[in-house]
């Protein structure tokens, strides 16, 4: 159990990422698939979807983000935005996480009593899958950080990679070699977050 908790504690946001990674693209892909497949979902819906981008596809994503943000960002602030995006582009790859919505609608119809809960459960399932992939990548020696440029990039991403209409983009997990430190993490006091009754 301590090894599992150590993996959770060690998972952090790394923003200085590179491409000096010992694992092959195939090994990374299998790691991501295994982490998503083994993440729990309500009613075994298996709604999380992942698109894994390497090389030109990875760089294309961050070009799309930059192009989408340019008209939305004040001109004087855009160089900072470009620098941030360049950092993501310098990484090895990106996992795009999606929520598959047809299964969600089917479950809402099949289990009407819980219909209002399924959207929340689907988001929780997506979060679990994302965190598991992030932790698995970190345990394999890679750093990562999670971004949310949806919905401003949704249409361009769907067009570029022929994403099904029933896949809703939820987040972008950037990964690569750790080229810097994650920095210190501060925690709220336990008495503000936890209650134990006997």
Image: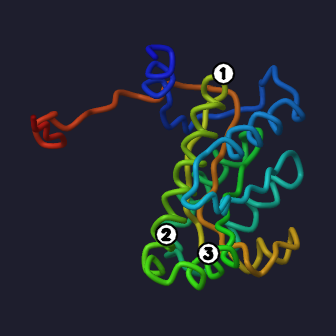
The residue that label 2 is drawn on is: 76
In the rendered structure, are the residues bearing label 2 and label 1 in contact, judged by CB atoms less than 8 Å apart?
no
The image position of residue 130, as x and y in percent, is: 59, 48
The image position of residue 33, as x and y in percent, is: 77, 43
The quadrant of the image that shows the C terminus is top left
In the image, residue 153 above or below residue 17: below
The residue that label 1 is drawn on is: 141
Query: Which of marks 1 and 2 precedes in the sequence?
Result: 2
The residue that label 3 is drawn on is: 104
Mark 2 Cα-neighbour bin, 10 Å: few <14, some 14–19, many ≥20: few
Along the line of sight, which residue is nearer the eye, 180 or 143? 143
Q: Which residue is drawn at 56% across and 81% down?
A: 108
Gap in Å between the C-alphas at discs 2 and 1?
37 Å
Query: Which of marks 1 and 3 precedes in the sequence?
Result: 3
The image position of residue 192, as x and y in percent, is: 12, 42
Relative to 36, 14 lies left or right: left
Q: Is mark 2 on a helix, strand or loop?
A: loop
Q: Which residue is drawn at 57% across and 33% down?
A: 135
Relative to 192, 94 lies left or right: right
């Amino acid at each position: 159990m301590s090894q599992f908790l150590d993996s959770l504690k060690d998972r952090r946001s790394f923003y200085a990422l590179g491409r000096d990674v010992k694992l092959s693209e195939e090994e990374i892909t299998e790691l991501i698939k295994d982490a998503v497949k083994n993440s729990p979902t309500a009613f075994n819906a298996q709604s999380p979807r992942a698109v894994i981008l390497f090389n030109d596809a990875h760089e294309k994503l961050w070009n799309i983000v930059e192009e989408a943000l340019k008209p939305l960002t004040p001109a004087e602030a855009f160089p900072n935005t470009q620098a941030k995006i360049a950092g993501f582009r310098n990484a090895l790859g990106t996992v795009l996480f999606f929520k598959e919505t047809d299964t969600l609608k089917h479950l809402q119809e099949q289990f009407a009593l819980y219909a209002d809960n399924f959207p929340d459960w689907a988001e929780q399932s997506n979060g679990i899958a994302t965190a598991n992939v992030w932790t698995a990548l970190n345990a394999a020696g890679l750093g990562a950080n999670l971004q949310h440029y949806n919905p401003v990039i949704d249409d361009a991403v769907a067009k570029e990679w022929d994403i099904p209409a029933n896949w809703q983009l939820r987040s972008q997990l950037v990964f690569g070699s750790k080229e810097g430190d994650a920095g210190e993490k501060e925690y709220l006091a336990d008495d503000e977050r936890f209650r134990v009754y006997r």
